[in-house]
Structures are given as C-alpha cells and as structure tokens.
Amino acid sequence: MTRIRVFTHPICHGCSEALALVQRLASEEPALEIEVVSLASPAGRRTAQEAGVVVVPTLVIDGERIVGVPTLEELRALVRESGRTGGRP
C-alpha cells in the first residue's frame, strides 16, 4: 500500500489544490493511504518538524517529497513508482 502524507495549513491556497489532487487520485486508486497533517495544530507542527517539513504544501509519498503543487500526472507517476519499489514502511 502506498502512503501519501499531505502537510497543509488552512491559509495556504496551494494546500487546498494539492489536497484536491491527492483526493482525486485516491478516488482512482483505492489502495492509497492518505494522511493529512495540518500545521494549524500543535500536533501537526510537531509532526512536520519531526519530518523536516518547513514549507506547505508538502507531499510525502513513501519517503519521496514533493514541495508545492504537483500535476496530477506527476503524482500518478510517483505513486506508480512507489508501487513498483514496494514503498517504504
């Protein structure tokens, strides 16, 4: 199973775009595990700090990072690649 962590903040316009893309891909690929981490909460900020995330939106797909809003094609390609390599724990 491929895991996508989406680091967001409510005032980030790009974050809503990135999240919409991830949700669209998840509707096409039911084997995706999606985790949304909001930096608006203390727990979300701690999680981001532990992950080394300093810019939102940031997507982490089985360890691979995308900073900013990817295209749907880029996102699909990373998910496919992750599936071929077996992903990371």
Image (cartoon, grey):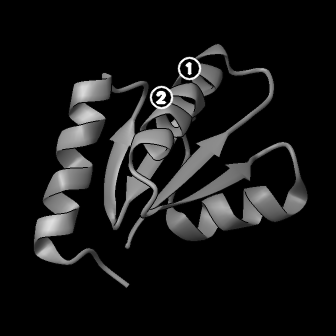
Q: Secondary structure at mark 2?
A: helix
Q: How many marks?
A: 2
- Which residue is rendered at x = 68% and y = 66% of the image? 47
Q: Quadrant of the C terminus?
A: bottom left
Q: Can you tell which quarter of the image residue 70 is in?
A: top left
- Which residue is rendered at x = 69% and y = 53% of the image? 37
Q: Is residue 30 left or right of 42 when viewed as pictured?
A: left
- Mark number, residue 42: none
Q: Is residue 23 above or below residue 86?
A: above
Q: Is residue 89 above or below residue 18?
A: below
Q: Is residue 68 left or right of 55 when viewed as pictured?
A: left
**Nearest the camera: 61 or 40?**
61
Residue ranking furthest to the top: 13
- Residue type at mark 2: give it: Leu
Residue 55 image position (x, y, % from top left)? 54, 37
> Do the residues under discs 1 and 2 have CB atoms within 8 angstroms?
yes
- Residue type at mark 1: give it: Glu
Q: Is residue 12 left or right of 11 when viewed as pictured?
A: left
- Which residue is rendered at x = 33% and y = 66% of the image? 63
Q: Crowding at label 1, few (<14), some or many (≥20) Cα neighbours within 10 Å?
A: some
Residue ranking furthest to the bottom: 89
As measured in the structure, the alpha-carbon distance from the residue carrying label 1 to the one carrying label 2 is 6 Å
- Please give the residue where the numbered disc 2 appears in the rendered image: 21
- Which residue is rendered at x = 17% and y = 42% of the image? 77
Q: Is residue 13 above or below residue 77?
A: above
Q: Is residue 37 above or below residue 76?
A: below
- Mark number, residue 17: 1
Q: Secondary structure at mark 1?
A: helix
Residue 69 image position (x, y, % from top left)? 42, 24
Q: Can you tell which quarter of the image residue 62 is in?
A: bottom left
Residue 60 image position (x, y, % from top left)? 42, 55
Q: Quadrant of the N terminus?
A: bottom left
